[in-house]
Image: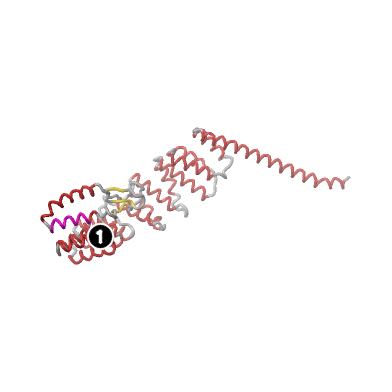
Amino acid sequence: MLELLFLLLPVAAAYGWFMGRNSLKHKELKGRANITRNLSSGLNFLLTDQEDKAIEQLLELLDIEAATIETYLALANLFRRKGDWDKAIRIHEKLHQLKLPKPQAQQIQFELAKDYFCAGLYDRAEKLLVSLVKSPKLADMALKQLFSIFVATHEWHKAATYQTAVDGTESRSLRIAMANMQVEASLQDENRQQLLLTLAEHYPAAIRPKFELAKQALAQQDITLAKSALLYIIEHKPQWSADLLPLLANCQLSDEEWYQLLSRLVNKQHNTSAVVLLGQWLAQHGSTAAAEQFLLDKLAASPSIRVFQQLLKVRQQHSAPAAEALSSVEELVNAYLAKKSLYSCRNCGFNTRNHYWLCPSCQQWETVEPIAGIDGR
């Protein structure tokens, strides 16, 4: 009898294990059925445009099942794109309360900060982003979002707080943004010229510190400094020649220096503004015939309305009988060009007749440049 008892013990243990396993499986299946039912109910609310009820139903699932975070993130992002920021905030706030792995928790924190930003809650967004600046994965995005807040609030001085963090990244756009915001903050600074010099040296990729430095130097009759700053920009960013050459014309360049500069821009960069100015120079220092032939050759190689406009002016000087007839043509050309955009954003394609250091469309710094092409400068 005792031996039979020992034989039955393994059977009893196996039976207990089997029943327990089935019980756990039954509970798991029951739990999944509840999740499926709640999820289906939530989706049904979404399909019938009852979004508030849908969110409440779906958020209840977060207490049961946290493995579907990506689904909730996608849903919240959908609401944010639609402009339903309050709904996106509710979802992201609920997700933010969960105990999740650090990378996932930080990503949710960043998304919540973006919600707050879109809703105009800049102080809340800033508080969330500050702690993400040290995140290896999210540092660049957090800094860009912080800078967007400073742009929206015009709190330019706050940018300098993150100079070390920006210098620690490899982002060229962040460095350019930092330089521009510090230039904005320096507008009322008594030591502005020294600050501009420092920014120009520290952020060589940024145009604005050197450009503002040159304008200030010209205003103070510091021709040497202005000339140096402008020539540096024109060497590294020749597409800005349309705005730089009129300033350089006030920097007392010799005739030979001016001719060499314009020739280099014409031959290497095919810059329209340089072609126009070189045509003027040839008409003044050579002959109108030489200037006319030069402009005709450039038009044959690359059609340009502005070069054609300059050709009309030269021909009016060269031929008095034709001046009256050509003046009416010039008026038509002037009227045509008066309606054309002068600048275009290389990032988003925004066109404008006015220059902006910050693109009004895509909010990127120093992407609005003089337009090239047949109507360009």
Q: State the SS at label 1.
A: helix
Q: Give the left or right position of residue 322, taking residue 299 as reference.
A: left
**Span colored in magenta:** 307-318
Q: Residue at x 39, y 43 (%)?
A: 122
Residue 100: percent from the left, percent from the top? Answer: 54, 47
Report the magenta stretch's main SS.
Answer: helix
Residue 322: percent from the left, percent from the top? Answer: 13, 54
The total number of labels drawn is 1
Q: As drawn, which residue projects farthest toward the right?
A: 1
Residue 286 in the magenta stretch? The answer is no
Residue 330: percent from the left, percent from the top? Answer: 18, 51
Q: Is residue 23 above or below residue 181?
A: above
Going by the numbered disc 1, the residue's amino acid type is Ala
Quarter holding the C terminus is bottom left
Visible in this render: residue 322?
yes
Visible in this render: residue 194?
no
Q: Residue at x 31, y 48 (%)?
A: 351
The foreground one among 274 and 101 is 274
Residue 308 in the magenta stretch? The answer is yes
Q: As drawn, which residue projects farthest toward the left?
A: 320
Residue that numbered label 1 is attached to: 300
